[in-house]
Amino acid sequence: MRESSPHFAFERAIEGLAKTIPGEEVLAARASFERRTGAAFPSDPFYEERTRAFLEELVCEHLLPSGETPAQATLRQSVRQEDAIDREVLVALGRAERGLFQVEERGGKRLLRCLFGNVRYDITMDSGGLDWTGRLGGGEIFDGRLVPFASGLRLLPGLIFHPPQAVACVVEIVKQAKERRVARRDVLDGLLRMRMRHDRFPGVHPKHFYRFEALWDLEIRSASWRRHGKVLAWPGAQ
């Protein structure tokens, strides 16, 4: 049932944890997120998708004055026996790992291959029917978070898929980034900016946005493929 689905349990927990963070911290965190990944507005069709991704980052990565994430701090403060189910969710959120995953179909099973570590994961699907399960087709690449839960691995709801036409470009970008030891977060955030440029300019083939050198281009709304001299160079380039 919808109410008992881990997917919705995580959604409820993330929304609830976000409300425990002071408003000024949330605004500062949102500004940082949009600076790194691109700003979305309520009128954008992808606004909800980006908001889910931001809330996951806020709950799983934002550090409170105690040095803990909201999930970790709430877990420490949660001591009531009746909180057992919520504690399991909090433990999972406290151990969430963001990555870039590609779907592989092997022997009738769907595996996730982490493009950074080349590790494959067998994930657990909810029986309640999630809005993203139908998109997990072979070859798809997405930005998301894996969590350990109920003796298995699950995906948190805030997935952001990269265009199918950009798969080869994304794989090449990650290959070059690994060779140059670019930080994982810089690659993930840079790819999300490329995805947003694709959303802003849907009539342009994504290959024009998904380029290694564009990892450091912070501009979103202007057409970077027409600004060859203004695209930021990789900091380690000669």
Image (cartoon, grey):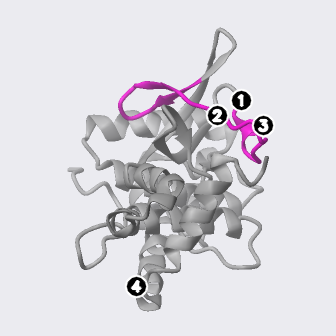
The residue beneath circle 3 is 134
Q: Main secondary structure of the magenta part?
A: loop
Residue receiving disc 4: 25
Does the CB distance between marks 1 and 2 fall below 8 Å? yes
Q: From this view, report whether residue 134 is shown above or below residue 193.
A: above
- Tag 1: amino acid: Gly
The secondary structure type at the circle numbered 2 is: loop
Dot 3 or dot 4: first in sequence order is 4
The reply to whether dot 3 and dot 4 touch (C-beta < 8 Å) is: no
Q: Amino acid at mark 2?
A: Glu
Kindly identify which residue carries mark 2: 140
Q: Which residue is mark 1?
A: 137
The span from disc 2 to disc 4 (Cα, nearest Å) is 34 Å
x 53%, y 61%: residue: 193
In-front residue for pair 91/207: 91
Residue 229 sits inside the magenta stretch: no
Per the model, the C-alpha gap separating discs 4 and 1 is 37 Å
Closer to the camera, 134 or 66? 66
State yes or no: residue 130 in magenta: yes
Q: Nearer the viewer, mark 1 or mark 3?
A: 3
The amino acid type of the residue labelled 4 equals: Glu
Name, please, the residue furthest toward the bottom: 24
Quarter where residue 43 is shown: bottom right
Q: Secondary structure at mark 3?
A: helix
Residue range (magenta): 111-136
Q: Is residue 214 visible?
A: no
Q: Of label 2 and label 4, which has the lower sequence position? A: 4
Q: What is the crowding at mark 4: few (fewer than 14 residues within 10 Å), some, or many (at least 20)? A: some
Q: Are marks 4 and 1 in contact (CB under 8 Å)?
A: no
Q: Position of residue 7 (x, y in %)?
A: 65, 49
